[in-house]
Amino acid sequence: DAKTTQPNSMESNEEEPVHLPCNHSTISGTDYIHWYRQLPSQGPEYVIHGLTSNVNNRMASLAIAEDRKSSTLILHRATLRDAAVYYCIPTGGGSQGNLIFGKGTKLSVKP
Amino acid sequence: DGGITQSPKYLFRKEGQNVTLSCEQNLNHDAMYWYRQDPGQGLRLIYYSQIVNDFQKGDIAEGYSVSREKKESFPLTVTSAQKNPTAFYLCASSIETTVLSYEQYFGPGTRLTVT
């Protein structure tokens, strides 16, 4: 399974963009990059995933480096409801479908 | 609304008692998972099931048992053999396990406290 490195914590101001980085230098060619977030005392919530190309959905954008060794989750306008722990998870062929969660990045959003 | 339900939200038990956590989904998903989360940590896989009447151990299965008699249901029993059962337990489901692009849907979790 690919190892990931994420900052322990980040801060943002409300309504400003947030860029959450993730390094996954040992990712294999077939691993998808998934991002989940977990609000306090709740189950994780799917945010976005991608393989090679940048991806956009209603929640966020995912920018994947050309060599796929890193990716960045972009929240275009942070709200107070975006305060959560964000997990970057490469999903590989040996995982049997389960997700390997690290400690993630705790995002704080200031009003 | 489709989703995953877990009950109860909070559960208290005395040491030495077995306890069963409920997980139900109405998403018609084949795969279901149980994770455990300790304070400040990520999730760790306990058991998973790819299809009815079949399940496999995850990374930390010791002291836990599961069943999958129905597609919709995947209950987890925390036995007295589990050394540190106090934790936040999360159930999840996905369409299947073999296609890596599918996302998992998580329930709200059950916080178990054993004293």
Image (tube, rainbow, N blue to C red):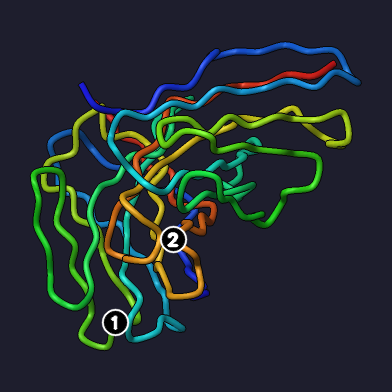
Type of amino acid under label 2: Gly
Q: Which secondary structure, mark 1?
A: loop
- Where residue B76 sits: x, y (%)? 63, 32
Q: Residues within 10 Å of mark 2 (few under 14, many from 20)?
A: many
Front-lying residue, B40 or B98: B98
- Where residue A101 sits: x, y (%)? 51, 54
Left or right, A58 with respect to B82, comes to left
Query: For the point 29% across and 38% down, which residue is it?
Result: B28
Q: Which residue is mark 1?
A: A68
Mark 2 and mark 1: span between their CA atoms?
Answer: 20 Å
Q: Residues within 10 Å of mark 1 (few under 14, many from 20)?
A: many
State whether residue A62 is above or below residue B13: below
Rendering quarter of residue B8: top right
Front-lying residue, B33 or A61: B33
Query: For the point 62% across and 55% down, which residue is it?
Result: B56
Q: Which residue is mark 2?
A: A97
Q: Which secondary structure, mark 2?
A: loop
- Chain of the residue on which disc 1 is drawn: A
- Chain of the residue on which disc 2 is drawn: A
Tell me whether marks 2 and 1 sit on the same chain.
yes
Type of amino acid under label 1: Arg
